[in-house]
Structures are given as structure tokens and as C-alpha cells.
Image: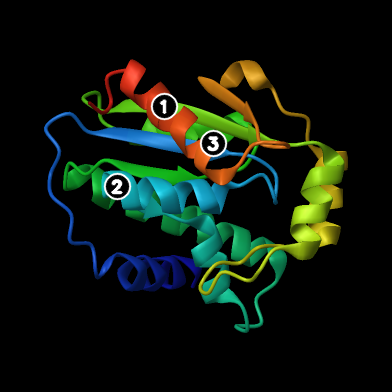
């Protein structure tokens, strides 16, 4: 049953992909807690680089209201991410995935992408106070599940982040959205992903 949900969700979210193949494809995996700026950064990368975004938050948003328990939502989102990643790789597209602040996401992506792909891992972090403030005050992005304060507090207590697992770590506490985007573009340029 969840396989059917994942396939249907992947079909809906990927039906409008109008991107060109990339001879040097790459994947950007962006991790971080809620309120760290992942969605904002990914939107900036989409606009600047015409980068395909595989958004787990968009998947969660599409599943809201379907009376699914938390474990089922997580499973469907993971399966949908897998299907969309495979499809993007088959099409030789460069893309970005909004992930969690857990190294197993990095391993999962590494196992999915072909050898000709390069993987760039980014971690956006912020002070607990800044993350809480952002979650409480941010405007709703249409089509993106943004989580709740309770989910953020639970994640902060449950997960510790291994910053060494990421190629670039940015503390967004006192940085503008534009500055964060500029730092990421500079990093991708220095790594040869973009020119």
C-alpha cells in the first residue's frame, strides 16, 4: 500500500520536470533542523542554478490530511525520495535534496547515485533560540510542510549532529538568506560543481 502511495506521490511531484541533462551531474544534500533555512536555501539554488529540488517537506505537505500515522508518512516520504532520486539520476539531472541532520541520509544518497555523480553535503545550523524563533514566526510556504515547535524541540533533544559528516557547515543564526546562498554558491564553485 505504501509503495503505491510513494509511486503516486513521486509521479505527481516529478511530472513537471523540465530540466536539461547535465554532463557533470551532482547532488546537493542539505541537512539541518527545522528553522535552519533549508527551504529558503533550496529555493535560492533552484532559481540561481535551475537545480531540481527533491523536497521532503513538499512530500509531507502533500500527505497531510490523508489520515496517515507518523511512521507511514515517514516511510512514504523515504520511498518517494528514493524513487525521485533514481529518476533524476536516470535523466542525468543535477539536483538537491532537503534531508535531516543525520549521517544515514548521506549514506542512503551515496548508495543511490551512480559513480559519475558528485555529492556535496551541506549542514545549516543555528542557535536553539534562533531556530525556535524562526519556527514560531516564519510565514507559511505554500506546498511545504514546515513542522511544529514540538517537532523541533523533540529533534533537538533526540539528535546530535556530526558536523564532520558535511562538506560545508553554515551557522545561519546571524546571516542573511542572501549571505547563506552566496556561501553555498562559492563552495559549489570551489568544488567544481558550478562555474
Between 41 and 108, the one lying in front of the other is 41
Is 40 positioned to the left or the right of 33 in the image? left
* Mark 1 residue element: strand
Estimate the x, y position of residue 30 in percent, counting from the top left. Answer: 52, 38
Mark 3 vs mark 2, foreground winner is 3
Quarter of image, res 149: bottom right
SS at badge 2: helix
Element class at badge 3: helix
Task: Name the residue located 34 percent from the left edge and 17 percent from the top edge.
Answer: 191
47 shown above or below 175: below
Q: Between disc 3 and disc 2, whose residue precedes? A: 2
Q: How many marks?
A: 3
Instruction: For marks 3 and 1, give the one nearer the viewer.
Output: 3
Q: Is residue 163 left or right of residue 85?
A: right
Picture quarter containing residue 177?
Answer: top right
Q: In the rendering, at what x and y percent does residue 186 appear?
A: 40, 24
Give the residue at mark 3.
180
Is residue 99 at all visible to an observer of this figure?
Answer: no
| Residue on which disc 1 sits | 120
Asked if disc 3 and disc 1 are in contact, CB closer than 8 Å, the reply is no
Label 2, label 1: how far apart the Cα atoms are: 17 Å
Q: Residue at the spot x=77%, y=64% of the render?
A: 137
Which residue is identified by label 2? 86
Q: Position of residue 184 (x, y in %)?
A: 45, 31
Which residue occupies 26% across, 40% down?
A: 94
Left or right of residue 10, residue 136 in this image: right
Disc 2 crowd rating (10 Å Cα; few below 14, some 14-19, many 20+) is some
Amino acid at each position: 500500500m505504501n509503495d503505491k502511495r510513494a509511486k503516486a506521490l513521486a509521479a505527481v511531484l516529478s511530472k513537471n520536470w523540465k530540466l536539461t541533462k547535465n554532463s557533470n551531474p551532482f547532488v546537493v544534500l542539505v541537512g539541518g533542523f527545522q528553522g535552519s533555512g533549508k527551504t529558503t536555501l533550496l529555493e535560492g539554488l533552484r532559481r540561481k542554478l535551475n537545480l531540481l529540488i527533491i523536497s521532503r517537506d513538499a512530500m509531507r505537505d502533500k500527505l497531510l490530511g490523508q489520515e496517515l500515522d507518523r511512521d507511514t508518512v515517514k516511510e512514504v516520504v523515504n520511498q518517494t525520495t528514493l524513487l525521485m532520486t533514481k529518476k533524476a539520476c536516470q535523466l542525468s539531472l543535477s539536483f538537491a535534496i532537503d534531508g535531516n541532520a543525520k549521517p544515514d541520509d548521506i549514506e542512503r544518497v551515496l548508495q543511490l547515485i551512480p559513480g559519475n555523480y558528485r555529492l556535496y553535503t551541506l549542514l545549516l545550523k543555528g542557535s536553539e533560540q534562533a531556530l525556535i524563533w524562526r519556527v514560531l514566526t516564519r510565514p507559511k510556504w505554500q506546498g511545504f510542510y514546515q513542522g511544529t515547535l514540538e517537532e523541533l524541540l523533540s529533534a533537538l533533544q533526540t539528535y546530535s549532529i556530526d558536523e564532520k559528516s558535511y562538506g560545508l557547515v553554515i551557522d545561519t543564526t546571524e546571516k542573511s538568506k542572501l549571505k547563506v546562498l552566496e556561501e553555498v554558491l562559492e563552495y559549489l564553485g570551489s568544488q567544481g560543481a558550478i562555474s
